[in-house]
Image (cartoon, rainbow, N blue to C red):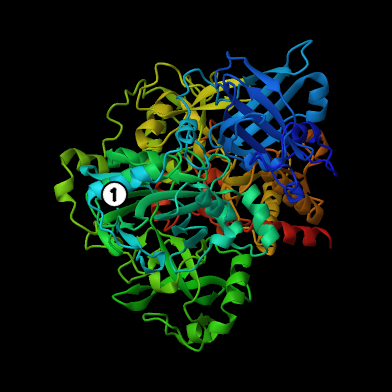
Amino acid sequence: MGKTPRSEGWSGDLTAYRAKRSAGETPEPFGVDASRHGSGPLTYVMQKHSATRLHYDLRLELDGVLKSWAVPKGPSYDQADKVLAVQTEDHPLEYADFEGVIPKGNYGAGEMIVWDRGTFEWVEDPHAGFAKGKLLFELHGHKLRGRWTLVKIKKAEVEWLLIKERDGLQGAGKPPLPDDSVLSGRTIEDLKTGADPAAPLRDALAEAGAPVKSVNASNVSLMLATGATKPFSSPDWVYELKYDGYRMLVERDGNRVRMLSRNGNDLAAGFPDIAVAVLALPFRRFIVDGEVVVQDDAGLPRFQLLQKRARVSNAREIERYAHELPATLYAFDFIAFDDFDARPLPLRTRKELLRMLLPSAGTLRYSEHVDERGVDFFAAAEAMGLEGMVAKRADAPYRGGRSSDWVKVRAHRTGDFAIVGFKKSSRTRGYGSFHVAAYRDGVLTYAGSVGTGVTASHLDDALAKTAADVTTKPPCAGAPTSAAAIKNDLWVEPRLVCEVRYLEWTEAGNLRHPVFLRFRPDKPAAECVADPSDATDSEGDVGPAFDISSSTDTRDKAETAPSPAVAADVRFTNLDKVYWPEDGYTKGDLVEYYRAIAPYMLPYLRDRPVVLTRFPDGIHGKSFFQKDAPDHAPSWLRTAAMYSEGSERDLSYFVADDERSLLYLANSGSIPLHVWSSRVATVQHPDWCVLDLDPKDAPFADVVKVALLLRDLCDRIGMPSYIKTSGSSGLHVMLPMGRQCTHDQTRMIGELIARQVVKELPDIATITRVVSKREGRVYVDYLQNGHGKLLVAPYCVRPLPGAPVSTPLAWREVNAKLDIRKFTIKTVPPRVKTLKKDPLAGVMDDVPDLVAVLDALQKLGGR
């Protein structure tokens, strides 16, 4: 049901609640804040309450109140536990914030903490659920997540059972949940004793030798990391995730909260949820360093979601987004507390103090780290699709400025660059890319132009923001000096900053294969410094920015630079068996093809569920699908437990992250490899939308015409588009989604575009699924977008005569001369070596402005 609509009026009844309490004698709220009843996600809270008996109180928002149940034994993730939940009186919405001591002599006297809090969704109509005695809901809390049900005990007035639903999150082996408040970090016992919560921190600071010195966040210079290209391991270092958010110094001084960005702006007004959480801590003065992020449904930081919040300035909109897109502060360093300056202390000590300051779970989170195993930690972060890691010397103090005591290792090489101009498009009358620059030795120096990933809305936005900064000549050294560049291109002062992904720096000092990722409104141009770790040496390799030879051993170096013999532990069998009788190709030829194509194919396989189609006797023999990895699969072969709707259970899907995994799958007799459109770490948010152009009885020339119209349509609406052969008889047009949508939303976008194509080419295109009704037209299939829907992977072989390959194409190749039969296991490996860039790569990197795309599509459809 999604976000269950609220009733128009306040239909919840607080009469019983108010009758049991005396205003002025209890600190509990009385339900006067009607503004809490509005649009947006519904409120959920689980409070721990030491009244006559210790118990938990579950509260779910409905009709302007919190429906409430007392849960004596507390919640359980074990499906076998059917926990008693006794329904009590409705509570006001403000009660979700209540934490404190209810005085003796009052109803419910005793200590209460907010044990868990968040939002939730009614999965089924709750009004009908109350009538039939069964409520199904999905929690999005800090401790409790997933689907749960309340089932009323027959013939009982108020007794229900709270049960965890089977959704992949259940399990008897769940670790014990933290017992402190997600607001204050305090426990019931802390409230009972009434002890000063700041005393242990002050004692620890004094014992550690922290100097007594008042610190103001405005005078704190951020400690910055130096870049490196390879992970390393050392017992002298700790390793943290590199977050995809806004770096901030967060300061509390009494009832005042400041959240200072890298350029010194106070962003607290834009993140009231963070500010409220800071004020909920039982401490008066402190400063922490961290990163503010907004997480997606899979719990991973998403910068695009954070930017949605950062763009909003209206107070009502800010409050709405605080509920719909709640932010989290991951604090990773402890700067000051009361009148102590913690910066001179070793990092390990500062992090121990930080853990004492923060709750175990909640809006304010302690940034966890691992000791010593940097290489393994980086591999795990990379597999999850995260940005990378930051390695920190464990005994180092906090020093402002860039330091080799902090080292960032990116999963993908990225950098921040100042936009210094706009380059004329070769295909349109307007501009098509950005000129970018970065500081080298204190001089702003040209770094090339970036067009991939840049949409029309990006260009319009940047042009509007730099309209007052236009200059007559390039504002940086090394920019193009040709008459055409000076005359046709637009140059601006460096005010706007963007993040760019790239392969490396060329010898000429330009970025190789740059891809625009996003604007960086949180960074000034002055901080766009070319990373010295990206300097290319004479052999074309990228060396580290500092000497880590004392911190690594031979094992670590071997791990960061693996031997080419990555498939040594794959036992190949029956390599001489003929798989393509007409062509004489064997299983050995298939394995060698996948070995040769692995560097180009693996980016489309990594962190993505794979489904095999195995042909043990060749293309004319019997074949079968295989989703579930067998128990005898090697331990090094990665699998991921994913729910299969067809099988109605969790399956262990194959995930091919490296060459030996790919070759293992090939050796199993799987000719094609089909992949999900989403990654394991972000399973509900696909990377792409595919439009499968299936000719059936239509001429291939019509397939080309439909594909070219699709490209033209995408250009008109600002949607990047890419194309590959299906490897069979048609073409796949692929549109990047940037993991911004659900599967259903992606399919909807595909349908809208497909319908517009049919509208413009009704004689040769159709969305009619039934073959007999297509009347010789090309079928534009948008239905291959959905949870668990499969796509034949780019560069994979098809079980057809000739051993054709599903091959990425440059759009210039899509013309009347295109012959998709020429792309085979013999021709594709030499082809890719001649390409400067994989023509399909942008489908996983681009993050289009989908709001602008849909707006343009709507206007186009309304003509």
Q: Is residue 195 left or right of residue 170?
A: left
Name, please, the residue furthest toward the left: 550
Q: What is the quadrant of the C terminus in the image?
A: bottom right
Residue 826 image position (x, y, % from top left)? 43, 41
Residue 859 image position (x, y, % from top left)? 79, 62
Is 128 located above or below residue 339 in the figure?
above
Q: Secondary structure at mark 1?
A: helix
Q: Quadrant of residue 74?
A: top right
| Residue tagged 1 | 205
Q: Label 1: few (<14), some or many (≥20) within 10 Å?
A: many
Q: Is residue 113 left or right of residue 196?
A: right
Residue at 38% x, 38% y is: 380
Residue 36 image position (x, y, % from top left)? 72, 48
Q: What is the quadrant of the N terminus in the image?
A: top right
Choose between 284 and 845: the one closer to the eye. 284
Q: Quadrant of residue 6?
A: top right
Is 478 located above or below residue 615 in the figure?
below
Q: Quadrant of residue 440?
A: bottom left
Choose between 763 and 426: the one closer to the eye. 426
Disc 1 marks which amino acid?
Leu
Name, please, the residue furthest toward the bottom: 472
Is 855 located above or below residue 738 in the figure?
below
